Image: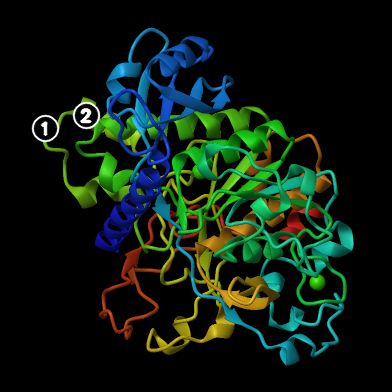
Amino acid sequence: MKNLRRKTLAAASAVTLGVGLAVAGGLAPAAATGPDTTFLVLAPQGATTDKAAARVASANGTVVATYDQIGVLVVRSTNPDFVTDVAGTGVESVASTAGLGTALEDSETVEVSAAEAANITADPTKEPLYGQQWDMPMIGLPQAHAVNAGNSGVVVGVLDSGISSSHPDLATQIAKDKSTSCLGGTVDTAEAAWNPTTSDHGTHVAGTIAAAVNGVGVAGIAPGVKLAAVKVVNDDGYIFPEAAVCGFMWAAEHGFQLTNNSYYIDPWELNCRNDARQRPVWQAVQRAIRYSSNKGVLNVASAGNSNYDLAHKLDDFGSPNNGTPEERENLTNACLDLPAEAPGVVTVSAVGPTGAKSYYSSYGQGVIDVTAPGGDTRFRTQGVRSTLTDGILSTTFNTATKTNGYGYKQGTSMSGPHAAGVAALAASAHPGMSPGELAAFLESTSVAQSCPAGVYNPVPLIPTGPHAYDATCSGGERNGFYGAGMVNAYNVVK
Ligand SMILES: [Ca+2]
Ligand SMILES: [Ca+2]
């Protein structure tokens, strides 16, 4: 898994370089030119970016986005010496984001046929496909909807690959005036810019949070709230730090109560042992996350799909080379997996239809805050083969045929939006809570789940080997697999 991630990161770097060269070819600069590269320039915390902007201009850079609130500039430059040239008064640090895109962990969509979608059930919510949504009764629907199905003043930002605004279950749910693309680190509010192009991941996430209860398709958890599409995943399936910064700042400045972040920016591999040059990039993202929290946004994030113990990363990599406590502290601070491990972010693990941890879900005591359904298509056969209906059913958009539909996906990408949806109901029923209060309420209303004893592995017969998905849960009522427990929609509104 780690090697795979390293390879995809290398691929992202190559793509960025290719695009940059094509752009640079059209310019006629006086000085030597390199590829058109994106940089994050940080002013000292609390300072304005005026002086830094002046340095950028003198170093042949172009500011494409200014975040004075957090002292961050997004800059593009073809100056191969930009990093050294920009250094000076008002610039605390600078780094290129080239190669720092992380791949979206998207599972293939398994679409439901039109015939199946048309098969009306007798379910009280009147949604034809509700009978396939095993995840909803697990978290307290439809009981919650009888009390509160969400308030339209609550906006949930889906920081993802866009949302299909033509989907019959989503068209009425999207706050178009609060939706944008953040690709390249700059805002583009055109509707086409925030619709999906190569991935329907965000469309699936959006349906879980707030698909309409309208007699069509599926039911979302909080159909009364509004969704905002914030596109941060590029057409190659990568999330670059400048897009994430833009997304958190957009959410902060547009009155969002919540964001859902079903992606995983993982600086650990490349950044945390030797590469100090990348730290400014992650510091910029963390400043943006912190700023959004201070502006009233609760950010919800997926734990990741690597069956990884997030509480013991240092153990996995061994001690840092020089092994000093100071170095270790620096590593810990600079190398959080973002946004999952940033302070104040609600981090969500995944369970399957039995309520047990999904074989793929990452975990970690003190890292996982709550759990929610994300699907587990392997537990039924102990890993031998996949049972698709044990994934999460939601809204889809086939990017090849440009058609809206319904389909199954699995992952912590699917569990995160369950927690975001429940939090949206909580914010609807209890307006005025701060992000910290909302997070604490989400946890205190969750249904605690115990650790399984010993080494846990629901898929011992999986082809990758009998121990490929071993995991050990630690903690008591609050533990590394499930955090405070399973989110519950009814408990937050009753
Ligand atoms: Ca519906
Ligand atoms: Ca957290």
Q: Given the current orientation, which residue lies at the most extreme left position?
A: 322
49 vs 256: above or below? above
Residue marked by disc 1: 322
Residue marked by disc 2: 327
Identify which residue, 28 or 483, lies in the foreground. 28
* Residue 67 visible in the displayed image: yes
- Residue at 16%, 38% in the rendered image: 320
User: Percent x, y for residue 2?
Assistant: 27, 59
Horizontally, is 101 left or right of 189 in the view? Answer: left
130 vs 18: above or below? below
* Residue 372 visible in the displayed image: no
Quarter where residue 77 is shown:
top left
Badge 1: how crowded within 10 Å, few (<14), some, or many (20+)?
few
Tags 2 and 1 touching, CB below 8 Å: yes
Q: Amino acid at mark 2?
A: Glu
Quarter where residue 272 is shown:
top left
Q: Amino acid at mark 1?
A: Asn
- Residue at 75%, 49% in the rendered image: 426
| Label annotation for residue 217 | none
Earlier sequence position, callout 2 versus callout 1: 1
